[in-house]
Image: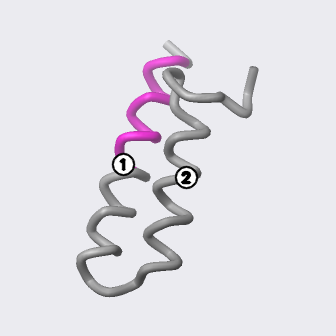
Amino acid sequence: MFALVLWILAVILVISGIVSLFRGEMMWGIVLIIVGLLVGPGGVSIFT
């Protein structure tokens, strides 16, 4: 259950980062994508 919540959170962060990149907010978009990849269960999760 917790892994599913982390996965959904990671997807939301990455999508928000991509949208920010398209809106011209490069730094914020990159930060959101990196945080999304770190939180996601497929990445290096900061909670394990």
Highlighted range, magenta: 3-12
Which disc is residue 26 wearing? none
- Report the mark closest to the observer, 2 or 1: 2
Residue 1 position, x and y percent, is: 49, 12
- The chief SS type of the magenta part is helix
Q: CA distance from mark 2 to mark 1?
A: 12 Å
Under mark 2, the amino acid is: Ile
Identify the residue position indicated by label 1 in the image. 12
Residue under circle 2? Answer: 34
| Vertical arrangement, residue 7 with respect to residue 13, above or below | above
- Is 5 inside the magenta-drawn segment? yes
Label 2 or label 1, whichever comes before in sequence order: 1
Dividing the picture into quadrants, the one containing residue 21 is bottom left
Q: In this rendering, would 25 be left or right of 46?
A: left
Residue at disc 2, secondary structure: helix
Q: From what the image shows, is residue 44 above or below residue 48? A: below
